[in-house]
Amino acid sequence: MERSTIVRVHEGLHARPATRFVKLAKGFESDVELVKDGKAVSAKSSVKLMLLAVKENQEVTVRANGADAIEAIEALIGYLENPRAGLDDENDGGEAGPETAAAAPAREGGPPAATAVDGTPKLQGVAASEGVAVGPAFAHFPPEIEGPGRRLQADEIEGELKRFRGAVASVQSRMDRTLAENNLSAGDRGIVAALRDIAADDSLTGEVERLIKGGDDAVSAVIAAAATIAADFSAVDDHYLNARADDVHAVGRQICLALLGQDELSLETIPQGAILIADDIGAWDLARAPLKRIGGVVCGHGGATSHIAIIARSHGIPAVLGLGDKINELRTAREVAIDGNAGHVIVDPDEAARADFSRRVEAAAQERAGLKVFKNVTPTRADGTVIEVAANIGSLEEIEAAQKAGAMGVGLFRTELLFMRHMHLPSEEMQAGTYSALAKAFAPHPVIVRTLDIGGDKPIAGIEFPDEENPFLGWRGIRMCLDRPDIFKRQLRALLRAAVHGNIKVMLPMVSEIGEVTRTRALVDECAAELKAEGVPHADFDLGVMIETPAAVLIAPALAKEVAFFSIGTNDLTQYIMAADRLNPTVAKLNDVTNPAVMSAIELTAKAGVAAGIMVGMCGEAAGRPDLIPTFIGMGLTELSMSPASIQRAKKTIAAMAAEQ
Ligand code: PEP
Ligand code: MG
């Protein structure tokens, strides 16, 4: 017996909704399966359900076989169609999914940098949770667990299975105790609950038992099974699920420790303000750690969407993750300074660096406290024109930080992360889901999505970039997209589909001639016609351009007639106007937005946009600078988009300007 439906669960069946679905399914005697695209998995395994990667608005079939099949189908279809009805949501609000992630990471770090501008040696990682900190190093390197690789005798197997089941039970009950203790935040509770579900899931326990029955010792079996399931999570076309691979390893480690009768090295003794240094740290361990005492986190593993990053951001702890083997350079550090905005770590800072960091920490704390009152301010010019202060973000995990800061929409959604996090190009489906979630989160405010802005300096899987002498002047941004309509159209179709859900606007990066806009518009029309023919809901969007090349500035009056808005990308505009590589510290002095040449390029752009009656905004780093905001507004800019951390300060600056006039 089976029935099909369209999934209405927000964001699809990721961690917690999968768990709820499983809980419902387990209440029935019947065998129950969920089927998507011809693939059927047991509805009683949350790991298998997550790996099916069911998204909101997709069609699925619930299949049941047994005495209570009718009731099972009724209940499960009911949940998929109306997930909030009739649930005993013990952990509601503790969602471990993308929607609860807090503050914003900056951008993925580049290759390890040896030396910074001032000569202080720095390590570069992923800027995973913003803020700066300096403090004593607390190295946490629990020894790696290795399976003995022992072959069991036939008469040992039953005993080994019992030992394994006992270990799982003790890990689960420890997690249950942690959940019951009631001193976890809602977000951390959701994360711990999701880990407990993995520990209890048949996918993991079933695979381990299979291996033990085949003669593997329990520890080796757990390590092998966790590695297999983690690899499955890594391969899914969904960055949230990719990050669950670390969770599976963490759960596997807990079960191994229980089997070995060992305790995890404790974080209980971490001193006040210390910087936690680890190769990897289980989200469960971090959630239970004395977080108030932790000044910062530095890890070899992890990325912007890992649970460690989510916990760090929601507790306002600066974090730099993904350092790789460089983490070993910190094993013997006495003191560490970290910059979670830039992804930098300084080992044993000298007197000057320490003083500099201490000053920044103190100043940031004082300022943060005073800025909160500006969160809900709608800043206006003296003539009453509203100035949109929006957020620059690069993933769904950053939505909450932007909203908490008081963002009036998104002025720049960098889509590169979506493409860089995967082993293959993201599907239209996945992109449509991501852009729709953004549109919904900020509606009725606008969300400006920038089409893929990538070049040979940041290659991604699935696109062959030629070797170039000068990748910054090469095949990148809109140039590459127009040459690869297969990739570009997938993104444009996803954006047209997402526009149904809110106020989506689209902007093109690296534009240097009008033909790039007209060719894009033709592709958009083509995509819209295809979607119409396929009967797929979609809506039109405003098309704008980034002004970040000198050519775009010089043709701004003509460009303004072709587009709905300008957004000035001062990061690239500065490097191209000044012919000074933005990544080259030797020419950092020239890379200065306040140079009169750059300021006059901004002014020319603003004049052209204002004369044509289109919106002129800015999304480069300069948009968040309080010393420059009055000048930009004076030039006619009405939208400024910046990192969430800068929003309240910018609102304050604009409010003060209006008050002075
Ligand atoms: C810019 O160039 O100013 C900009 C916002 O884009 P990115 O920093 O992503 O190149
Ligand atoms: Mg740019």
Image (cartoon, rainbow, N blue to C red):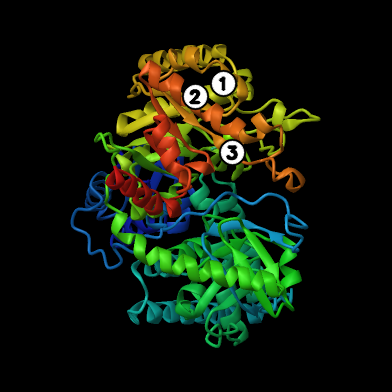
Up the image or down, 603 lies above or below 237; here it is: above
| Residue 442 in picture, x, y percent from top left | 32, 42
Nearer the viewer's eye, disc 3 or disc 2? Answer: 2
| Residue 259 in picture, x, y percent from top left | 59, 82
Q: Secondary structure at mark 3?
A: helix
Around disc 3, counting alpha carbons within 10 Å, would you say few (fewer than 14), some (14 to 19), or many (20 or more)? some
Q: Earlier in the sequence, mark 3 or mark 2?
A: 3
Q: Which mark is residue 552?
A: 1
Any atom of ligand 2 within 8 Å of the CB at mark 1? no
Q: Earlier in the sequence, mark 1 or mark 2?
A: 1
Left or right: 15 with respect to 249? Answer: left
Q: Given the image, on which type of amino acid does mark 3 rest?
A: Asn
Up the image or down, 551 lies above or below 98; here it is: above
Q: Which residue is mark 2?
A: 605
Q: Given the image, on which type of amino acid does mark 2 rest?
A: Thr
Q: Which residue is mark 3?
A: 571
| Residue 400 in picture, x, y percent from top left | 37, 53
Quarter of the image where one finds residue 314: bottom left
Say if mark 1 contacts mark 2, CB within 8 Å: yes
Around disc 2, counting alpha carbons within 10 Å, would you say few (fewer than 14), some (14 to 19), or many (20 or more)? many
Q: Give the residue at x 63% y 66%.
A: 299
Q: Nearer the viewer, residue 257 or 365?
A: 365
Q: Give the residue at x 55% y 33%.
A: 599
Q: Given the image, on which type of amino acid does mark 1 rest?
A: Ala
Q: Quadrant of ligand 2?
A: top right
| Residue 304 in picture, x, y percent from top left | 54, 55
Label 3 to label 2: alpha-carbon separation = 15 Å
Left or right: 632 with respect to 423? Answer: left
